[in-house]
Image (cartoon, rainbow, N blue to C red):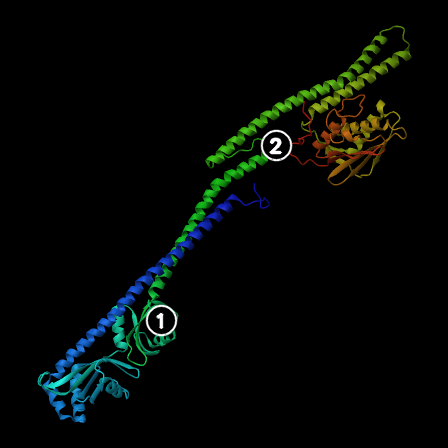
Amino acid sequence: MLTKDTPGIRTRVLLLASLVLVIAGSTSASLLIIRGRLQQHAQAAFSADLYRSVDLFQKLQTQKLLSLRRANALIADLPSLKALMTTRHQQTVADGSVPFWKVSGNDLFALADRDGNILALNTHQTSAQLLPALQQKFSDPSQHLLLAGSDLYEYATTPIYFGDQATGTLLGYVISGYAIDHELLQDVASSAGSDAAVFHGSQLIASSLPDARATRISGALQTIIGASAPVPAVLNGERYLAITKDFDSSENAPLRLVMLKSFAQTDAAEKQINRLVALAGAIALAGGTILMLLLSRMLTSPIERLTSGVRAFGTGNDTYALPSNGTQEVRFLSKTFAQMREQIQTTNSKLLEAERLATIGRMAASISHDLRHYLAAVYANAEFLASPNLSEAERNELYEEIRLAVQGTTEMLDSLLIFGRTGNALLRTTASVEVIAERAITLVKSHPDSDGVTVTFINNATDTTAAVDGRQIERALYNLLLNACQSARQSPTTRSVSLTLTATPQTVTASIVDSGPGVPASIRDNLFAPFVSEGRQKGTGLGLTLAWTVAREHEGEVRLVDGRAGSTTFLFSISRTLHSADGASPARHGVLTL
């Protein structure tokens, strides 16, 4: 299975990351597009509303002015008013004007004599500046806006005649008007769907906004005035779209109408849409993640199983189940790998069979000469024994030669049998390796190849008991000691072999040292392969191979520690306990079971 240490990015993580990036990018792009389109649409709609609001205010102003003139004409034609104006007494006219003001219902009502002098002035709000301002404005008949301090009125003037206008006598003038104040602008705002404010220069005269917001318009006025199209403005943290219109420039500072459209509802709708889009994106992300997890599992799980199958096949497991589900590509890959694995197994079987035949051929070539030598000795000595003229000493000598030939043949066949049976179940019992080593040394000392060689035994372990197959361990130590004796006999000086036992809680180790010429470098790499030797005159060439195989079957090893002349050292180690379930040996380096 894949682990955290495996390099590269997992397919599942890559798919999930791609999905998250796609959904997050789509959601963000949708939010930006919707926001931009919504703002463009809102600004276009609000601009049209502002233009309509300005037109509505101007139409309302015109209609009110016409209404004032009609009302003035009716009042000016009243006989009681004409009689009042004939008195020309200011106080009398002022007192007598009140009923007419109340009947008119206007915010401003004034009467002037025929010379233009204001005799009576009635308003809901008393202002010391109003009378002088009206007196000054009255001299210019074209004017119809009156500004007195912070009060703004639109008024109409109608002459009062005694008789008809063409031939009658001018008695005076009736003046009536309405206030452009908070109530009027609120009516305009409710009708137009926009807020309105009137400025004299930078001074706020009236507004439909609450006082707290209205005072902040003055701060933003400089960015609003002069714009030929609606411009954005921020009042008290709230976004507006504003437009200005000059409707009187006769004053020393012009009168300006400011119409404003709030983005509050649009911003609220935008936030709600953003929340809905974000929620939809989150739901899509959650659903997509779950779906992608399922899809990625369907995709990557067969790939991981296929990877495990490849790894298992690499370790020798050729029965690992390969995935049969997944996508079409994965199934094709699994089928192809199964066919490849079968082909490799078939090829390997043929290779093993060919190597088996080659091994048998090498074995036959290896033992044919020695076996023929032993059989020739038996045959010749048997013919000599048939002679009746032999003495007892000669007969015993011939018997001894026959015995040695038979013993050599038996040892050769035993080695071949052990080599052919390697890999079979071990018969492990608790035994002392020290006792087994002593038996092996005794056997080696009786072999002709140990003549002239000093064999010593050193036990440095207090306890050498282990779960072993005693016969195989004895044979392995015997082969190592015999190989050491054969090497030591080639030494021109000291001919010695030593076996030293050491032990740990887990292993027992035998160290075999000889004084021979050493191990040639040409055979060190494949020293434990069968039929490998250097200048071998007799034997099967299986001694080191059998020792190595026995050590591996006992969960140990044989290795060459020192290959130099005079101190050639082999270490033979085995486990004291059996760890594997069946005692089967691990894979061997080129050793075939016959």
Considering every residue shown, the one lying at the far front of the view is 167
**In this view, 356 is above or below 98:** above
Relative placement, left or right, of 190 versus 328 is: left
Task: Say which element carries label 2.
Answer: loop
Badge 2 amino acid:
Gly
Frontmost residue, 499 versus 299: 299
Relative placement, left or right, of 482 versus 223 is: right
User: Residue 174, located in which quarter of the rendered image?
Assistant: bottom left
> How crowded is the residue under tag 2: few (<14 C-alpha within 10 Å), some, or many (20+)?
few
Q: Which residue is mark 2?
A: 316
Q: Are marks 2 and 1 in contact (CB under 8 Å)?
A: no
Total number of numbered labels? 2
Give residue 224's mark: 1
**In this view, 265 is above or below 76:** above
Task: Say which element carries label 1.
Answer: helix
Does residue 483 appear anywhere in the picture? Answer: yes
> How crowded is the residue under tag 1: few (<14 C-alpha within 10 Å), some, or many (20+)?
many
Considering every residue shown, the one lying at the far top of the view is 388
User: Residue 569, located in which quarter of the rendered image?
Assistant: top right
- Residue sitting at x 20%, y 75%: 64
Relative placement, left or right, of 3 versus 110 is: right
Q: Percent position (x, y) of residue 428?
A: 71, 31
Q: Quadrant of the N terminus?
A: top right
- Residue sitting at x 13%, y 85%: 160
Does residue 446 appear anywhere in the picture? Answer: no
- Residue sitting at x 88%, y 14%: 397
